[in-house]
Amino acid sequence: MSKSPADTPWRPRSVVVGRVGRAHGLDGAVHLEGHGGAVALRSGLEVTLGGRPAVIVERRGTDQRPILRFDCASDREAAEALRGQEVAVAGAALPEPDPDDYLHVDLIGCRVSAGGRELGTVADVLVYPANDVLDIRGGEEPLLVPFVDDVVRSVDVTAREIAIRDDFL
């Protein structure tokens, strides 16, 4: 069952899924940097490219390192001009995560507590090789908390609450 935007009012209207990298070949294709693979990028998908509407004309590469060609770039020179621009999709295009999996965008803004004590809210989710880390702000002091089962007791995205072990701090 997928959620409608009304079911996820915390989600932004659009979500950045990557940044245009170097050109690939001569036909206007580019590498997409920073794409985590959560959103299926396919031909015909409408995106926002550097704040302007665009459409993916062709998709190649892997899920983690896609190569895209947009309708606004038909040669290498035009592709190079896009370098560094953000690629965003509508928030409604985000997939419904599996149980016990969470999209970073859904964790941002959640209140974090430990043993009934408010620690702040998730300002960002940092990606590290071993695990993701919650960047918690707005409490007594900024905190970085590993997002792992040994630390996180519960996550309720709908209620916008995350509880961590009180003996972790």
Image: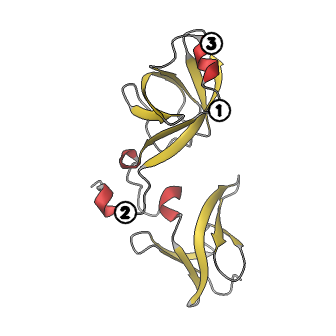
Q: Residue at x 31, y 62 (%)?
A: 7
Q: Residue at x 69, y 82 (%)?
A: 168
Q: Is residue 65 left or right of residue 10?
A: right
Mark 2, residues whose alpha carbon is within 10 Å: few (<14), some, or many (≥20)?
A: few
Q: Position of residue 22 (x, y in %)?
A: 66, 23
As drawn, 36 above or below 129: above
User: Closer to the N terminus: mark 3 or mark 1?
Assistant: 3
As drawn, 125 above or below 52: below
Q: Residue at x 39, y 48 (%)?
A: 95
Mark 1, residues whose alpha carbon is within 10 Å: few (<14), some, or many (≥20)?
A: some
Q: Quadrant of residue 19?
A: top right
Q: Check disc 1 and report the residue beneath it.
A: 84
Q: Mark 3 and 1 residues: CB-CB less than 8 Å, in contact? A: no
Q: Quadrant of residue 159?
A: bottom left
Q: Given the image, on which type of amino acid does mark 1 rest?
A: Gly
Quadrant in which the C terminus appears: bottom right
Q: Given the image, on which type of amino acid does mark 2 rest?
A: Pro
Q: CA distance from mark 2 to mark 1?
A: 29 Å
Return the mark for residue 9. Answer: 2
Q: Position of residue 78 (x, y in %)?
A: 58, 16
Quadrant in which the N terminus appears: bottom left
